[in-house]
């Protein structure tokens, strides 16, 4: 795993690196620090974690453009915005870029704890399972194996490539245990975008690995326009 910190303030880049290395288990992680001008090109792996400021001096969208480049190269790379912008901007960027976290400068108090919580999430994310309940039994399911979720009457149906089962938890409770690769595309339906094969924009249908077609509401299609657009090109 590699951390890449991109900010126009050299001292802040150093501060973010110091905070990361102060967290348990991250002392020896590979960390790169760059200004936007230095980072002319970027190589991206699935396990990379990018900490990006949104603005670069007078350029208020430098970080957003870089994030879109990163996301176009690797859908699974983590993007964390670290910015002075108001947290309300996160809702706009969620559909556009799917950031893993959104931190507000300065990184102290609650924001510092959010950073440490995110690092704990990364530590536990490899081969991460969630615990579900079906009938009287509890069982673990690998997050990456889930194709999509659908609320049926009072139960939530969980679909993997080779299995289907119903659980007692609400879909909102399950989604809260999942990662940023799961998109709520309609009332009572969430999909693992990494398990999607293509998208029919005219009918707003997402085709999954098992060839199931999932309907995406008009509002969600607008929110996830760029993500679904990349599926349309496959």
Image: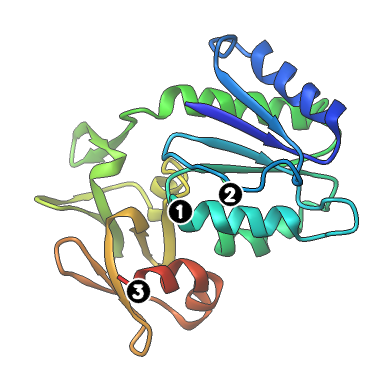
Q: Distance of mark 3 from mark 1, alpha carbons?
A: 14 Å
Q: Which residue is mark 3?
A: 233
Q: Which residue is mark 2?
A: 99
Residue at the bottom extreme of this rendering: 202
Q: Nearer the viewer, residue 70 or 203?
A: 70
First in sequence: mark 3 vs mark 1: 1
Q: Distance of mark 3 from mark 2, alpha carbons?
A: 22 Å
Judging from the image, what secondary structure is the residue with disc 1 in? helix
Q: Position of residue 116 (x, y in %)?
A: 64, 23
Judging from the image, what secondary structure is the residue with disc 2 in? loop
Q: Is residue 1 left or right of residue 23?
A: left
Q: Nearer the viewer, residue 149 or 41?
A: 41
Q: Is residue 170 left or right of residue 39?
A: left
**What residue do we see at 55% from left, 71% from top?**
223
* Front of the two marks 2 and 1: 1
Q: Which residue is mark 1?
A: 73
Are dots 3 and 2 in contact, CB under 8 Å? no
Are dots 3 and 1 in contact, CB under 8 Å? no
Specify whether residue 154 is in view.
no
* Front of the two marks 3 and 2: 3
């Amino acid at each position: 795993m590699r951390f890449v910190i991109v900010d126009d303030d050299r001292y802040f880049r150093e501060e973010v690196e110091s905070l990361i290395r102060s967290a348990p288990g991250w002392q020896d992680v590979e960390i790169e620090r760059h200004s936007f001008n230095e980072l002319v090109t970027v190589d991206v792996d699935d396990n990379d974690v990018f900490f990006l400021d949104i603005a670069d001096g007078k350029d208020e969208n430098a970080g957003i453009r870089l994030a879109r480049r990163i996301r176009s190269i690797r859908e699974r790379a983590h993007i964390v915005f670290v910015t002075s912008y108001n947290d309300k901007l996160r809702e706009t960027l969620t559909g556009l870029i799917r950031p893993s976290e959104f931190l507000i400068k300065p990184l102290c108090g609650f924001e510092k704890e959010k950073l440490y919580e995110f690092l704990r999430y990364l530590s536990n994310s490899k081969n991460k399972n969630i615990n579900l309940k079906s009938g009287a039994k509890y069982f673990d399911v690998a997050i990456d194996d889930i194709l999509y979720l659908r609320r049926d009457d009072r139960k939530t149906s969980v679909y993997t490539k080779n299995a289907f089962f119903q659980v007692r938890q609400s879909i909102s409770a399950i989604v809260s245990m999942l990662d940023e690769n799961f998109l709520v595309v309609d009332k009572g339906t969430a999909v693992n975008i990494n398990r999607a094969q293509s998208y029919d924009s005219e009918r707003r249908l997402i085709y999954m690995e098992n060839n199931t077609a999932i309907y995406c509401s008009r509002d969600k299609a607008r929110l996830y326009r760029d993500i679904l657009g990349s599926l349309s090109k496959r």
